[in-house]
Amino acid sequence: MSRKIQISLPSTGDEEWQATREPLTTGWLTQGPKVAQFEKAFAERHRVPHALATTSCTTALHLILAAMGIGPGDEVIVPSFTWVATANSVLYCGATPVLADVDRRTNNIDPADVARRVTPRTKAVIAVHLFGLCADMDALRAVLPPSVAIIEDAACAAGASYKGTPAGGLGLAAAFSFHPRKSITTGEGGMFTSKDANLSATADMLRNHGASISEEQRHKGPRPYLLAEFNLLGFNYRMTDLQGAVGLVQLGKLDRFIAERDRWARWYIGELASIPWLRMPVLPEGGQHAWQAFVTYVDPDRAPMPRNEIMERLQADGISTRPGTHAIHMLGYYRERFGCRPDDLPGARDCDSHTMAIPLHNRMVAEDYAYVVERLRAIG
């Protein structure tokens, strides 16, 4: 049988399967007690007082901006090298995403470039903890006026930390993802976290159509005739109890998953150090990398062939790879709407062209890792 190593696979099993039995048998399938338990456990793990489960990280980001009152005339600074949803969430509010460059070494937003893009209309900066490495929050705060909020796009960063503080509590609010390519998954799904009680209360209403009371409160209360008041224009961003039940099980495995990924990531770094054209990802100082992905950088001046050819060779060998992510300013919609050019943000442009994620997930075995290293070394 030919070898096939996927770039990522969710690690689920019988425990997740069994966890769905209670929602299915009780009939409580939409947001309810399992979601509430998942939110409480997630908040405790990430040391924040407030967590709200959502349909995706994208909707969690949208909730944050909407709860802040971000709208037309406002600007939000966003790194260009990130998944497009980060910038899209700003557009959903009618505000303007201002794309900033990234550090080629960390793939994260460049505070010096952010400083150049702040205007009187800047209301927030979205700091993306790309691939599980927290952005340099201290350097970012140092270049921003106190009035500009920092929002964490922690899609890849469940379990990550920065100088001892978990992701999710490093800014005004944060958004996490539970997509199957993340370290823990609920299929689709996301989480809003914050230390701000008022912002969280507003977000809680907005995710449920703007309702003043939750579905659980309404169904379990003593007055069956009671309907919610709607004083806000909200959305339906609720997570289901089926997902919440799976999320609880997955969250219980998070620290073990990260520890395993961290061990193999460090092994990769040691084994691949002899390849002069392949730059390794950065290890954080005083923090924890969540290792949602192991993203290398192919040096175009030293590599024996272009990155895409290297990826094709690895694919032929049964090893899946991917570009780290894309540069938003090089995508068609943003090029046409905002007149972006590739050279406008050279760091993001280069990361778009030269990053390469190699397999790292919790269903790989030692032989898989050894084979990846062997085939990379064979390229020359």
Image (tube, helix red, strand yellow):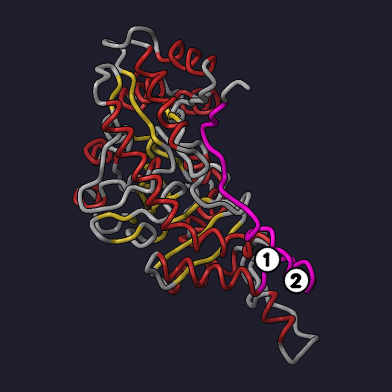
What residue sits right under mark 1 in the picture?
Answer: 241
Tell whether position 16 is magenta.
yes
Q: Quadrant of the C terminus?
A: top left
Instruction: Work out whether residue 170 or residue 247 is closer to the camera in this orientation and state it.
Output: 247
Pointer 1: residues within 10 angstroms few (<14), some, or many (20+)?
many
**Is 332 colored magenta in this rendering?**
no
Provide the residue designation for mark 2: 28
Quadrant housing residue 295:
top left
- Residue found at the very far bottom of the displayed protein: 222
Q: Quadrant of residue 236?
A: bottom right
Percent from the top left, x then y, of residue 336? 52, 23
In the image, is 96 to the left or to the right of 103? right
Q: 124 above or below 25?
A: above
SS type, badge 2: loop
Check whether the beta carbons of the residues at disc 1 and disc 2 lie within 8 A of each other.
Answer: yes
Front residue of this view, candidates 256 and 307: 256
Mark 1 vs 2, N-terminal side: 2
Q: Amino acid at mark 1?
A: Asp
Residue 128 can be seen in this image? no
How many residues crowd mark 2 within 10 Å: few (<14), some (14–19), many (20+)?
Answer: some
